[in-house]
Amino acid sequence: MKKTVVGITVVGKDREGIVAAFTNFAFSKGGNIEKVNQNVIKGLFGMYLEVSFSKTVDVKGFDVEIQNLAKKEKMDVSTHHETNSQKNIAIFVTKEPLCLETIIANVKTLKGKMTVVIGTEKTLESLAKKAKIPFVLVDEKNQQKAEDKIIEICKKYEIDLISLARYMRILSPNFVWRYPNRIINIHPSLLPAFPGALAYAQAYERGTKIVGVTSHYVTENLDQGPIILQDSFNVDPDDTLEKIKRKGQILEANTLVKAMKMHLENKLDVRWRKVHIKSK
């Protein structure tokens, strides 16, 4: 029988006994812990458990019991059950349209449903609505308030994968830890060179001969998450900055879609902070 895998995320105020409480719960249900990762930043505790079961699991019963434990331990807990069914995708945007346009154009090739577009401003609302995708504006300046709202939206739409389509806002550990290896970002350079928002300008000023892009999973360490795909193009000495930017933006969008497609087809496995492509 094929084993059932359940991902468990635990986020809340750090204190003793949390790890034991949830690992013991997994063991008591006949689970085998295959992955465990925990972090503490400024008193905030985050843990991800990946638990496998060789026997059939009562998913609803499991979720009810772990939520009861979450209330007892005063932690925010969510579970993610790996299935072969269509996954729900959330696209986070700001104002640059090309990544969102490219995802929409390729939606039929993705093993998932574009469930919601979340924007920090209304610039791309019409693009989402034209594609008949719900658009939700989250323009709160306070990061915690904005992320609290986004968390509720993602829970409402039962989001499996988050794609940052040139989303120009930093996500805190409090959010990122809830979606381990399920948030994909696109960066306009071959990391770690030329980091930041002005990557193309830096590359242009330095006279680089090759410009690249990097798609990666998002961690609390900003652009240092596990790399999924990288691609590049050659730069002609006569290319203007605008031409380089346009080429780069097209490559960004295409590379982001490729990474999303591989994730949705369960072709990616993260081990020791590296992404491995599954052979089957």
Image (cartoon, rainbow, N blue to C red):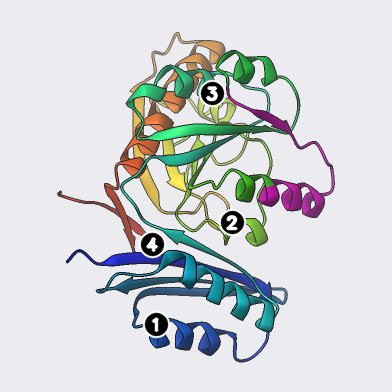
Numbered disc 1: secondary structure: loop
Instruction: Name the residue type under label 2.
Output: Val
Badge nearest the viewer, 2 or 1: 1
Q: Secondary structure at mark 3?
A: helix
Q: Position of residue 67 (x, y in %)?
A: 60, 72
Q: Quadrant of residue 52?
A: bottom left
Residue sitting at x 51%, y 24% = 99
Q: Which residues are magenta?
A: 133-152
Q: Is there any visible trace of residue 272 in the rendered image?
A: no
Question: As rendered, which of 255 and 233 lies closer to the eye?
Answer: 255
Label 2 and label 1: CA atoms lie apart by 27 Å
Q: Which mark is residue 29?
A: 1
Mark closer to the observer (2, 4): 2
The residue that appears at 41% across and 88% down in the rendered structure is: 28
Which residue corresponds to the image point at 67% horizontal and 15% vertical from the top-left?
A: 126
Instruction: Give the mark, 2 or 3, whose residue is nearer the N terminus.
Output: 3
Q: Earlier in the sequence, mark 1 or mark 4?
A: 1
Q: Is 147 rendered above or below residue 195?
A: below
Q: Earlier along the polypeptide chain: callout 2 or callout 4? A: 2
Question: What is the x, y in percent for residue 121?
Answer: 76, 28
CA distance for labels 1 and 4: 28 Å
Which residue is identified by label 2?
176
Element under disc 2: helix
Q: Amino acid at mark 1?
A: Lys
**Label 4 sits on residue:** 273
Q: Residues within 10 Å of mark 1 (few under 14, many from 20)?
A: few
Q: Amino acid at mark 4?
A: Arg
